Amino acid sequence: MALKGIAHARLACGCRVSFREGVEGSPVTVMLDLKSPGCGVSWHVTGLPLYDYREALRVPTRFLPPREEGFEEEG
């Protein structure tokens, strides 16, 4: 699979990223090509991939109760 479209982008902090083919389950990997001298983000490191650490995308760390079926609100 060859990537088509945008090859590079610049983030709001000034860093430059590129897009590469990813692995199974994630079709694109975002790599930090060049860290901006004015960037204050400590985890922006030239040559390393950027990952999304938002809570919504994390695997749950505890078991959740089973989902109830047929629940309806009263009134």
Image (spheres, rainbow, N blue to C red):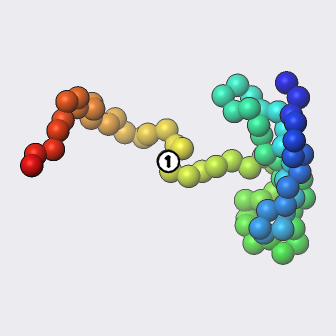
Residue closest to the eye, 40 or 13: 13
Tell me: 2 left or right of 70.
right
- Count every numbered label the image shows and give the total: 1
- Residue at the limit of the structure toward the left, as seen here: 75
Question: Can you give x and y, in whole percent of width and height, for residue 54 in the image?
Answer: 56, 52
- Residue at the limit of the structure toward the front, as seen here: 75
Q: Is residue 55 above or below residue 35?
A: above
Residue carrying label 1: 56
Q: Quadrant of residue 3?
A: top right
Give the residue displayed 90% in from the left and 46% down from the top.
Answer: 7
Residue 23 shows up from this direction: yes
Give the residue displayed 88% in from the left and 29% down from the top.
Answer: 2
Question: Can you give x and y, in whole percent of width and height, for residue 26 in the image?
Answer: 69, 33
Q: Quadrant of residue 1?
A: top right
Give the residue displayed 74% in from the left and 28% down from the top.
Answer: 23
Label 1: how many residues lie within 10 Å, few (<14), some (14-19) or many (20+)?
few
Residue closest to the eye, 75 or 39: 75
Q: Quadrant of residue 42?
A: bottom right
Give the residue displayed 84% in from the left and 75% down from the top.
Answer: 38
Question: Can you give x and y, in whole percent of width and height, for residue 43 in the image?
Answer: 73, 59
Residue 47 shows up from this direction: no
Residue closest to the eye, 4 or 24: 4
Question: Can you give x and y, in whole percent of width and height, for residue 30 in the image?
Answer: 79, 45
Tell me: 42 left or right of 74.
right
Residue closest to the eye, 16 or 40: 16
In the structure shown, which secondary structural element does the residue marked by tag 1 occupy? helix
Instruction: Residue type at mark 1: give it.
Output: Ala
